[in-house]
Image: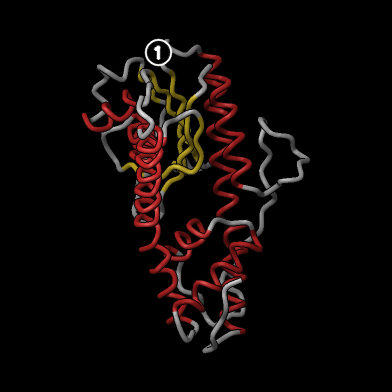
Amino acid sequence: MTADEPAEHDEVERLRAEVRGLRVRARTRPLIAQAQGILQERYRLSDADSAFALLQRASQRHNVKLRTLARVLVAAPRPGTDELWFPQRVREPEPALGFVPQHRPDAGNRGAVLSAVLTRTLAVVGADMGNVQVADRVDGGLYIEKHTGLTEEFVDFFAYVGDDGTACAKAARDIAQVTVRDVESDPVFDEPARAAILAAGCRGVHSVPLTTTSGLCVGMVSAHVAHRLDELSRAQLKALDVLGAESGRWLAWHEGTVVLDALEHVHALGRDGWGTRMRRS
């Protein structure tokens, strides 16, 4: 290796990271811009920056990601004339999760729960690579929220997946666990997805849908291994079924309680600041 090669390698990695960042922003910005436009029109705000300030303040106060808040806002019905956006909703207690302590300091924290979902899944499957995806209410499909052990190229390629061509898409479509024993030969993958998974050193995959009480898929957790994956035992599948059901109910509760609390906060700020200019925090 020449003296210049380490510097060239660092520059290539920097450029790759920059491109990945640009792709993430390109996927997120249209959604944020749509939410800003809705708020600017609804509360007669002076500019888009004021609308962003509403989102930002509610996001920070309720510990809800800006992207998550914007997705629910765009899909939510327009508020009426009441002071509250959702005056008829019933607040439910946080559902218990068997794989996390009931009395924990981060109660209501979606990021912490999704991390626990991933950790538990990897432990059951016996894997050290995996990711958690959440259903996209606006465009359909799934987008990654948590991951571990996977390459940046993998995360970039599968940042958002549609309805076909992957194990997680099939699991979401069928509302059933999917085991891929050998990525190289399994027909569930389209060729670009197969190549991306193999390039990341993944050979076997197991995907578990996160479902609500009514059977709606609201997310997905997938475990990846570097070797052919043996069939899981009945005990493993049962444990993952329970985890998927508990996690799905919790995600539905979070959206119907914590996220709607954040939207109510947006509504209160918008009504108070009607027609004015607001600053980002």
Secondary structure at numbered mark 1: loop
Res. 47 in view: yes
For the residue pair 21 and 88, the one nearer the viewer reads as 21
Task: Name the side, left or right, on which 194 lies relative to 111.
Answer: left
Q: Residues within 10 Å of mark 1 (few under 14, many from 20)?
A: some
Q: Residue extending furthest front?
A: 3
For the residue pair 134 and 1, the one nearer the viewer reads as 1
| Quadrant, the C terminus | bottom right
Pinpoint residue 73: horizontal percent, then vertical percent: 47, 65
Query: Could you tell me which residue is drawn at 64 percent across and 60 percent down?
Result: 62
* Location of residue 156 by image quarter: top left
Vertical order, 37 against 22 (above or below): below
Query: Could you tell me which residue is drawn at 44 percent across and 19 percent down?
Result: 225
Query: Could you tell me which residue is drawn at 67 percent across and 31 percent down?
Result: 98
* Location of residue 116 by image quarter: top right
Pinpoint residue 163: horizontal percent, then vertical percent: 29, 41
* Location of residue 41 by image quarter: bottom left
Count the numbered circles shown. 1
Q: How is the image coloured?
A: secondary structure
| Quadrant, the N terminus | top left
Res. 142 in view: no
Give the amino acid type for the residue marked by disc 1 in the picture.
His
Q: Which residue is mark 1?
A: 227
For the residue pair 265 and 194, the one nearer the viewer reads as 194
For the residue pair 203 and 217, the one nearer the viewer reads as 203
